[in-house]
C-alpha cells in the first residue's frame, strides 16, 4: 500500500494538455524574458541528466534507465549532451495507467558519464522551491518555481488519471511555465546544499486556469512502483536522508519539539 504525505490543500484538475507534441519556439517560458538560463547553472543541479525526451536516472540493478512521460513514448530513445542512446526494445514499463514511463537504454557503445539520480521517496511541501529543467524544441532551459498544490489530473490524450505536482505561473519575475516539447522534463528540489532529488516529471499544462499551471507526475507518490522496476543504484549516490536527519537541526533550536512528519523543511 502506498504511503504519501497529506497536504493541507490539493487541486483536482479535470483535463490537461500533454506537452510533447505541441509546437513551440523554445523550452520553458521564463516570466519577464529572463536570459542566460540555457546553460548549466551549477550548484550541483543534475542538468546533464535531462535529455530531449526524458531524464536519465543512471545505472540500476537491471540496467541504465530513463524516466519520462508516458505520452512521450520511448521508441526514439534519448539524446544526452549530444550523444544519442537507443531504447532497448521490450524494456518499456508504464507505471499503472499513469502518464509515467520507464525504459532502458543501450550502452553497448559506452554508457553516459553521468551520476545516478536520487529519486525522491517523499514529495516537497507546498511552498517549497523547485527547479525545472526541460529540452523542449531542442533548447535546454532551467527555471524556478514553487510547489502550489497536488491533485489528480487527466491528459486529454491519455484518459486515466495521474497524481501530480502543480506549479503555477502568476507573473513573478523569473518564474517558470512549461510549454510544447517540455514533456518528460524534470523537477528537482535541493534537499541540502548541492543535494538534489528528482521529484517530478513534466507532463501537461493548463492555460485556461488563471494563473496558468504546469502539472508534473509526483514521483514521491509512485516511488515504490519506480523502485520496483529499476531496483537500486549500482554506483555510489547520496542516500536519501531520513527525516530524523533532516529535522535534527531544528530539534536543537530552543525547546522545539519536532514530530515525525513526512514533509520537507521550508
Image (cartoon, helix red, strand yellow):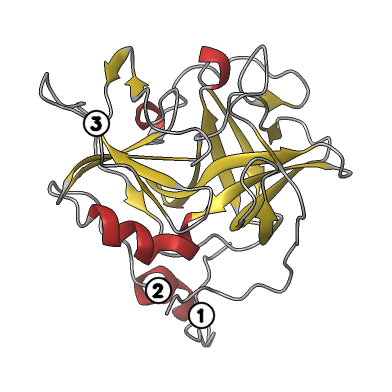
> Can the viewer see residue 194 in this picture?
no
Q: Could you tell me if the residues under marks 2 and 1 are in contact, i.e. CB atoms within 8 Å?
A: yes
Label 2 belongs to which residue?
243
Q: Dot 3: what SS?
A: loop
Q: Does residue 192 appear to the left or right of 153 in the view shown?
A: left
The residue mark sitting in front, 3 or 2, is 3
Instruction: Relative to 228, say whether 2 is above or below.
Output: below
Q: Gap in Å between the C-alphas at discs 2 and 1?
A: 8 Å
> Can the viewer see residue 20 in this picture?
yes
Question: Which quadrant would residue 172 be assigned to in this image?
Answer: top right
Question: Which quadrant would residue 80 be assigned to in this image?
Answer: top left
Instruction: Relative to 136, say whether 155 is above or below.
Output: below
Q: Dot 2: what SS?
A: helix
Location of residue 220 in the rendering, given as x and y in whole percent from the top left corner: 47, 61
Label 3 belongs to which residue?
114
The residue mark sitting in front, 3 or 1, is 3
Residue 27 vs residue 227, the one in the foreground: 227
Neighbourhood count class around disc 2 (C-alpha, 10 Å): few under 14, some 14–19, many 20 upward: some
Amino acid at each position: 500500500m502506498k504511503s504519501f504525505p497529506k497536504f493541507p490543500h490539493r487541486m483536482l484538475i479535470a483535463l490537461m494538455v500533454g506537452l510533447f507534441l505541441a509546437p513551440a519556439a523554445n523550452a520553458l517560458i521564463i516570466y519577464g524574458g529572463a536570459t542566460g538560463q540555457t546553460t548549466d547553472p551549477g550548484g550541483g543541479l543534475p542538468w546533464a541528466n535531462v535529455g530531449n525526451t526524458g531524464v536519465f536516472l543512471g545505472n540500476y540493478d537491471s540496467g541504465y534507465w530513463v524516466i519520462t512521460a508516458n505520452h512521450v513514448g520511448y521508441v526514439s530513445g534519448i539524446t544526452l549532451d549530444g550523444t544519442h542512446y537507443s531504447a532497448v526494445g521490450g524494456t518499456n514499463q508504464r507505471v499503472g495507467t499513469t502518464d509515467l514511463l520507464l525504459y532502458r537504454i543501450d550502452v553497448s557503445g559506452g554508457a553516459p558519464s553521468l551520476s545516478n539520480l536520487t529519486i525522491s521517496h517523499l514529495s516537497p511541501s507546498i511552498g517549497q522551491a523547485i527547479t525545472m529543467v526541460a529540452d523542449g524544441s531542442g533548447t535546454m532551459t532551467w527555471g524556478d518555481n514553487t510547489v502550489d498544490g497536488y491533485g489528480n489530473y487527466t491528459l486529454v490524450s491519455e484518459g486515466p488519471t495521474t497524481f501530480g505536482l502543480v506549479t503555477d505561473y502568476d507573473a513573478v519575475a523569473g518564474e517558470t511555465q512549461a510549454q510544447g516539447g517540455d514533456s518528460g522534463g524534470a523537477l528537482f528540489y535541493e534537499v541540502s546544499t548541492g543535494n538534489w532529488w528528482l521529484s517530478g516529471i513534466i507532463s501537461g499544462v493548463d492555460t485556461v486556469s488563471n494563473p496558468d499551471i504546469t502539472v508534473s507526475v509526483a514521483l514521491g507518490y509512485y516511488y515504490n512502483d519506480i523502485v520496483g522496476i529499476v531496483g537500486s543504484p549500482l554506483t555510489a549516490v547520496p542516500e536519501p536522508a531520513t527525516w530524523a536527519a533532516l529535522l535534527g537541526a531544528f530539534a536543537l533550536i530552543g525547546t522545539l519539539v519536532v514530530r515525525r512528519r513526512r514533509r520537507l523543511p521550508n
